[in-house]
Amino acid sequence: FFLPLAAVCVVCRRLQTMIDDAVLLEAVAKQGGYEEVENEQAWGAIAKVLGQRKTDASKLKQRYEEMLLATADAEKEDEDEEAQIIGREHEVEDILDDRIEAGEKQYLVKWRDEPGEFEDASTWEPVDNLGGSRSLIAQYERRKEAAARLTDGCAADSAPAAAPAAAPA
C-alpha cells in the first residue's frame, strides 16, 4: 500500500501544523510573553521559530489565545469551587478538647462533613470561629468539669489514710 507523494505532503503539512501546546507556550515565553509578542507583533517570528509559515501566525495567535481562555476558565472553576467550600457553613459535631495557643483559647472541633470531604475532620479553632456552637462548648465545659471532679474524688479516695495520732505518753 503506497500513498501518492501529494498525499504524503499533505499529511506531513498537517503534522507540522499540529504543534504541541507546550512548545507554543515556550516559544511565546521566550519572546517575553503574550503582551510582548502582541506589542511587537511577533507572531510571524514565532511561526518561523516553530517551523511554520508566516501566514500561519494568526492561527498560532488564535490557538494561544484559546489556551489562555481555557486556562482562565479552569482557574475560575477552581476558585468558584474553593469559594463554595470555604463559604459553606460547616456543622460542628462535637468539641473534643481545648488548649491555650498564643494566649487564645482554642477548641478541638470534630466537624460533621460529607464522608471523604476532608482527610482530617477535626481542627483547632478559636472561640470566635464557633459562634453558632455555644451550646456544644458549654456541654464540653460541663463534661470537663465533671471529669475533673471525678478525678479529684478518685484521688482523694485513693490517698493513703493519715497515720493515727500518737497517744500522749
Image (cartoon, rainbow, N blue to C red):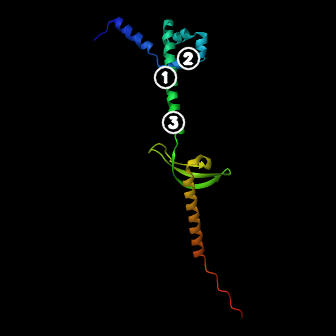
Amino acid carrying mark 2 in the image? Val
Amino acid carrying mark 1 in the image? Ala
| Element carrying mark 2 | helix
Amino acid carrying mark 3 in the image? Gln
Outermost residue, bottom side = 169
Circles 3, 1 touching at the beta carbon (< 8 Å): no
- Pick whichever of labels 2 and 1 is earlier in the sequence: 2
Q: Is residue 165 above or below residue 48?
A: below
Pick the front one: 87 or 2: 87
Q: Position of residue 112 (x, y in %)?
A: 48, 48
Q: Position of residue 6 (x, y in %)?
A: 35, 5
Answer with the quarter of the image where residue 142 lies: bottom right
Residue 70 visible, this angle:
yes
Q: Position of residue 48 (x, y in %)?
A: 52, 9
Answer with the quarter of the image where residue 8 lies: top left
- Residue displayed at 68% across by 91% down: 167
Circle nearer the viewer, 2 or 1 = 1
- Pick whichever of labels 2 and 3 is earlier in the sequence: 2
Residue 70's label in the rendered image is 1
| Element carrying mark 3 | helix
* Residue for badge 3: 84
* Residue for badge 2: 28
- Which quarter of the image is occupied by the N terminus? top left
- Residue displayed at 59% across by 46% down: 129
| Element carrying mark 1 | helix
Circle nearer the viewer, 3 or 1 = 3
Mark 1 surroundings within 10 Å by alpha-carbon count, few (fewer than 14), some (14 through 19), many (20 or more): few
Mark 2 surroundings within 10 Å by alpha-carbon count, few (fewer than 14), some (14 through 19), many (20 or more): many
Using the numbered discs, state the Cα–Cα distance from disc 2 to disc 3 in whole angstroms: 35 Å
